[in-house]
Image: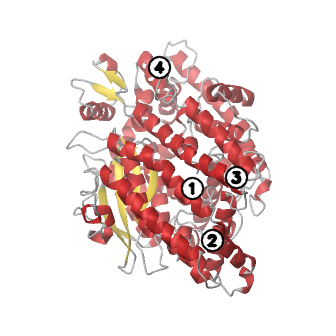
């Protein structure tokens, strides 16, 4: 295949240089990535072997500029592997994942390149650099140090082998989970099987069956957006048990897709890597470049929540048992019962029925609500571009324009579950914002996995779905509003325990009463959601927080224990999970939000390994941050919104996270607002989580 035959190696003559989705085939990726890696190597060699003394321009800025062709192709490749894969693309992924990992690792271990960076880093205070330039230099220096550039030749060789092997294993782990999630799930054949299910769930299950070619049936897939509603409403306890057990056993089934040996090897390699780099364990290594800094700081935060959450969950469980008894059902509450009886209690206690709220939460209107909130806060507008040729018919494209009409990015919205798409919800970029060589527009995508309604009918969301939509949109805004010079510092490329702040903070606007009154309109009548229903929704959202906190914090605690271990060789992850949950006193009626054999956050890559705690760390920030708008008496206060945009959404990695938060909020964050938001016992005094994060 020649360059002229490969669209990935040609200039993309598309609107805003979007990837040429309609022309790209899996066979194009291997030769394109090989060509781009060779070009990147040549660029790196030119920097490392430059005869001129190192300067910021010829070393740090040049390093940020290098590899743009590879980045462009690689981002497209990884996005398609996650959002619209195929057996052919997965084969390329298995081949290229270790090669790409080895390529990037070799650059970070390049001694000549690091020597130039090291000279600049040592005298950075005397170079008259801008603050952003210093930040870039410091980040690159730490990247190389964390990668092991100081190691001996033999240690570097071993580290390179570990990095390549981890890439292979993570790819296989991800593909195994996707294969389990994209199977047939629970097939329902009769009206009796559908007992208790509202029409919206029936319609989504019918559409899932249709998309899988299963006639005269309904399918409950293992996607959270369909199985959780099934567990909430199905009157068939036997079917709830079957569906639940299939869901929690993803990645744990004997055979070729068993993730347990894969996770075991990943953990052993991570531990070996950490020790090669001078750390006691992988948790110490991972936290060295996070706000928390130490496992002790993380433990302190989680400890403030764990026991109050268990106490709250115990009271909730008592209420579930009482509800079951009131219905003449003398049963022990099992994990597949919790959501079912919780919905009954919520309806009785708050006169609130989740099925009654969904007609007001159509996907299109909730997406428009997110757009409207972004415009009212930050002045940006989203303009539909149906002419964009994208990678799937479900995906919608938008121009994003600032208040002065200037285009600042492109947004892609991909909302529906399908067998070719991995589960969960996430944001990613096809191109990151920068301006080191002129303005580069970001191309950002939001992925959700909502259950699609049949053709001609609107997709209706639960309140949890709405929260997810706004969460991912907050990540999207973080990428779209970025205004930095260097790609290494762009958008979401911040410390991992700060990256969830923009997303979780934006969730708060989803349920602001004035936002709901404006956008939560009945899909059939256009009537606005009644104030009484809004009030019930807001009250009901405080219910079941013990359960939700326990399932999340248990996952974070097990993650930290797993990666803080000294000798994971030969570990049985299911036995470890079981023992650790027993040690911390996990309630029998609740399971982890993500069990280890399908815990993509931990094993599909390293970003959240020893880092699942970051959602709660960020929740301390987001709850405290939104409190500023409450104090101002206006959820769209323009002064606060401008500070938020400038210091959090637009600054990328140019600011230290602590400084960025202080610049927005005017002070440090405390845990009180988060504990109050979850209905847990607040501490008796305000305790800052910054600047010394070890306080947590």
Disc 1 and disc 2: Cα gap in Å? 32 Å
Kindly indicate whether the residue at mark 3 contacts the one at mark 4 (C-beta within 8 angstroms): no
| Residue 489 shown left or right of residue 18 in the figure | right
Q: How many marks?
A: 4
Mark 1 vs mark 2: in front? 2
Q: Which residue is mark 4?
A: 241
Q: Which residue is mark 1?
A: 500
Q: Residue furthest bottom?
A: 128
Q: Nearer the viewer, residue 43 or 181?
A: 43
Taking the image as drawn, is residue 532 in sight? no
Q: Nearer the viewer, residue 453 or 283?
A: 283
Element type at marker 1? loop
Local crowd size for mark 3, using a 10 Å CA cut-off: few (<14), some (14–19), many (≥20): few
Marks 2 and 4, the one that precedes in the sequence: 2
Coordinates of residue 274 in the picture (x, y in percent)? 71, 48
Task: Classify the position of the N terminus by image quarter.
Answer: bottom left
Give the residue at x 59% y 26%.
Answer: 319
Coordinates of residue 672 in the picture (x, y in percent)? 70, 53
Marks 4 and 3, the one that precedes in the sequence: 3
Marks 4 and 1, the one that precedes in the sequence: 4
């Amino acid at each position: 295949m020649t360059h002229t035959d490969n669209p990935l190696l040609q200039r993309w003559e598309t609107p805003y240089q979007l990837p040429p989705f309609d022309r790209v085939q899996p066979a194009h990726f291997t030769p394109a990535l090989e060509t781009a890696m060779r070009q990147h190597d040549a660029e790196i060699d030119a920097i490392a072997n430059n005869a001129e003394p190192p300067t910021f321009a010829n070393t740090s800025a040049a390093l940020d500029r290098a590899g743009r062709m590879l980045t462009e192709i690689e981002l497209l490749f990884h996005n398609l592997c996650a959002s619209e894969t195929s057996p052919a693309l997965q084969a390329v992924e298995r081949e290229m994942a270790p090669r790409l990992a080895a390529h990037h690792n070799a650059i970070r271990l390049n001694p000549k390149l690091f020597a130039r960076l090291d000279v600049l880093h040592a005298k950075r205070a005397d170079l008259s650099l801008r603050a952003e330039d210093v930040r870039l230099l410091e980040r690159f220096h730490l990247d190389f140090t964390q990668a092991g550039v100081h190691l001996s030749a033999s240690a570097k060789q071993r580290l390179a082998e570990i990095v390549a092997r981890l890439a292979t294993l993570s790819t296989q782990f991800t593909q195994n989970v996707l294969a389990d999630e994209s199977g047939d799930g629970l097939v329902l054949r009769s009206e009796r099987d559908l007992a208790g299910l509202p029409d919206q769930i029936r319609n989504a299950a019918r559409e899932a069956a249709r998309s899988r070619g299963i006639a005269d049936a309904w399918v409950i897939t293992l996607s959270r957006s369909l199985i959780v509603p099934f567990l909430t409403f199905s009157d068939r306890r036997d079917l709830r048990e079957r569906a639940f057990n299939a869901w929690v056993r993803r990645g744990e089934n004997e055979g070729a897709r068993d993730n347990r040996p894969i996770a075991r090897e990943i953990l052993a390699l991570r531990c070996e890597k950490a020790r090669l780099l001078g750390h006691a364990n992988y948790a110490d290594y991972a936290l060295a470049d996070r706000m928390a800094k130490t496992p002790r700081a993380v433990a302190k935060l989680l400890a403030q929540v764990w026991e109050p959450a268990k106490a709250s969950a115990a009271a909730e469980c008592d209420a579930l048992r009482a509800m079951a008894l009131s219905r003449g059902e003398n049963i022990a509450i099992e994990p597949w019962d919790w959501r079912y009886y919780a919905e009954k209690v919520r309806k009785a206690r708050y006169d609130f029925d989740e099925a009654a709220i969904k007609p007001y939460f159509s996907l299109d209107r909730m997406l428009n609500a997110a757009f409207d909130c972004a415009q009212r806060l930050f002045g940006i507008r989203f303009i539909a571009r149906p002419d964009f040729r994208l990678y799937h018919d479900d995906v919608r494209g938008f121009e994003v324009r600032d208040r002065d009409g200037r285009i600042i990015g492109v947004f892609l919205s991909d909302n529906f579950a399908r067998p070719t798409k991995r589960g969960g919800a996430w944001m990613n970029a096809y191109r990151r914002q920068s301006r080191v060589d002129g303005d580069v527009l970001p191309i950002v995508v939001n992925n959700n996995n909502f259950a699609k309604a049949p053709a001609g009918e609107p997709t209706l969301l639960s309140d949890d779905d709405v929260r997810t939509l706004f969460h991912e949109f907050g990540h999207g805004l973080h990428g779209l509003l970025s205004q930095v010079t260097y790609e290494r510092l762009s958008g979401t490329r911040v410390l991992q325990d700060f990256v969830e702040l923009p997303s979780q903070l934006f969730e708060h606007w989803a349920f602001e009463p004035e936002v709901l009154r404006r956008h939560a309109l009945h899909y059939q009548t256009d009537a606005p959601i009644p104030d009484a229903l809004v009030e019930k929704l807001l009250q009901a959202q405080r219910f079941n927080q013990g359960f939700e906190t326990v399932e999340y914090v248990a996952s974070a605690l097990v993650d930290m224990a797993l990666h803080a271990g000294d000798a994971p060789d030969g570990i049985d992850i299911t036995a470890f999970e079981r023992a650790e949950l027993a040690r911390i006193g996990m309630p029998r009626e609740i399971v982890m939000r993500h069990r280890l054999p399908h815990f993509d956050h931990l094993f599909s890559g390293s970003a959240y390994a020893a880092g699942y705690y970051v959602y709660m760390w960020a929740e301390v920030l987001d709850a405290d941050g939104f409190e500023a708008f409450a104090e101002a008496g206006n959820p769209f206060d323009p002064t606060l919104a401008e500070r938020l945009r400038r210091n959090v959404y637009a600054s990328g990695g140019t600011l230290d996270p602590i400084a960025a938060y202080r610049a927005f909020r005017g002070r440090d964050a405390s845990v009180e607002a988060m504990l109050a938001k979850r209905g847990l016992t607040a501490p008796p005094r305000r305790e800052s989580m910054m600047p010394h994060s070890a306080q947590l």
